[in-house]
Image (tube, rainbow, N blue to C red):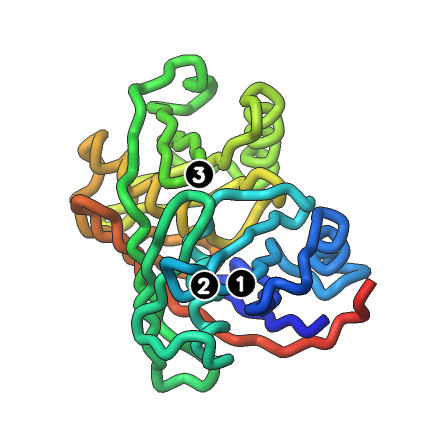
Amino acid sequence: MRLTKHHALGNDFLVLLDPDGVRPVGADVARAVCDRHRGVGADGLLRVTRAAAADVTMQLFNADGGRAEMSGNGISCLAQAVVLAGLATGPEVRVTTDAGPRAVRIEPTVRRGEHRATVDMGAAKVGDDEPEWMEDDVLRAARVDVGNPHLVLHMPEYAGDDDLVGRGVRVNELVPGGINVEIVVPDGDTLEMHVYERGVGLTEACGTGACAVAAAAARWELAGNDVTVRQPGGDARVALGDTIHMTVPVVHVATIDYPDA
């Protein structure tokens, strides 16, 4: 089984190109290849097949084997993979996802193996404030739907990874189906974000999370409609409008031949 590995801001994915649809995978395969000690290691596995109404279809597995509807960084990695493999000519790659159709503009940069991806992420739906999550230093809390679910917590400062993991575990025990949890700390013209992803845990970045944070911050009047979201893995640029556009760098890391189970 040939895989390619990519990352966007340190949020890394393995891509399986299966244009003819002959190599279905399940939770067991996703867990095995994403294992960072006994497999290749990644935050998720993307299976790519051909689509009738788009260039390709994306099937997304989290590192724990669970399915996810959408990933902003994942779809950026997918777009790079299919352009490098010649499955789409670019610069625009149309992708069918479980969250609906998405489009990625993928362009090379001057750095070897790197592209710049701008994803039309669709519309964000920001819910009402939810006081039940406003414990400790949480100033505001709201759920945001960006094709997948998020709980955005506005805090005056980041209390550290252990605190976020504890919150993420507790929230996911209470929310049926699980939810991504983001801490947002406004910092001048930027938003500092840290994320606990359902099915993965702490990650260096999250594309849908950056969009969810930007949308919630705009609703709370903490930021404007064009904002930089600073994450441990780097910066995402998010522009809000009728739909959200997110721009990140994406890097091809390696091509791997993995023993086929």
Task: Verify CB contact (< 8 Å) between mark 3 and mark 2.
Answer: no
**Res 37 → quadrant:** bottom right
Q: Which quadrant does the N terminus fall into?
A: bottom right
Which residue is label 2 attached to? 56
Pointer 3 or 1: first along the chain:
1
Q: Position of residue 255 (x, y in %)?
A: 63, 78
In the image, taking residue 222 as reference, residue 47 lies left or right, namely right
Pair 3/2: label in front: 2
Write the residue at 61% across / 37% down.
Answer: 162
Q: Position of residue 138 (x, y in %)?
A: 40, 24
Q: Residue furthest top?
A: 132
Q: Nearer the viewer, residue 104 or 21?
A: 21
Element type where label 2 sits in the image = strand
Residue found at x 46% / y 76%? 87
| Tag 3–tag 1 contact (CB < 8 Å) | no
Amino acid under disc 2? Val
Q: Residues within 10 Å of mark 1 (few under 14, many from 20)?
A: many
What residue did someone put label 3 on?
Answer: 148
Is 135 left, or right, of 62 in this rendering?
Answer: left
Between tags 3 and 1, which lies in front?
Answer: 1
Q: Residue at x 48, y 35 (%)?
A: 181
Q: N-terminal of the two: label 3 or label 2? A: 2
* Alpha carbons under labels 3 and 1: distance apart: 21 Å
Earlier in the chain: of badge 2 and badge 1, it is 1
Up-down: is 240 above or below 218? below
- CA distance separating discs 3 and 2: 20 Å
Asked if the residue under mark 1 is in contact with the one under mark 2, i.e. CB atoms within 8 Å, the reply is: yes
Q: Position of residue 88 (x, y in %)?
A: 41, 75
- Residue located 35% across and 81% down the image: 109
Instruction: Give the quadrant of the C terminus.
Output: bottom right
Please tell me whether residue 68 is drawn above or below residue 51 in the rendered image: above
Residue at mark 1: 49
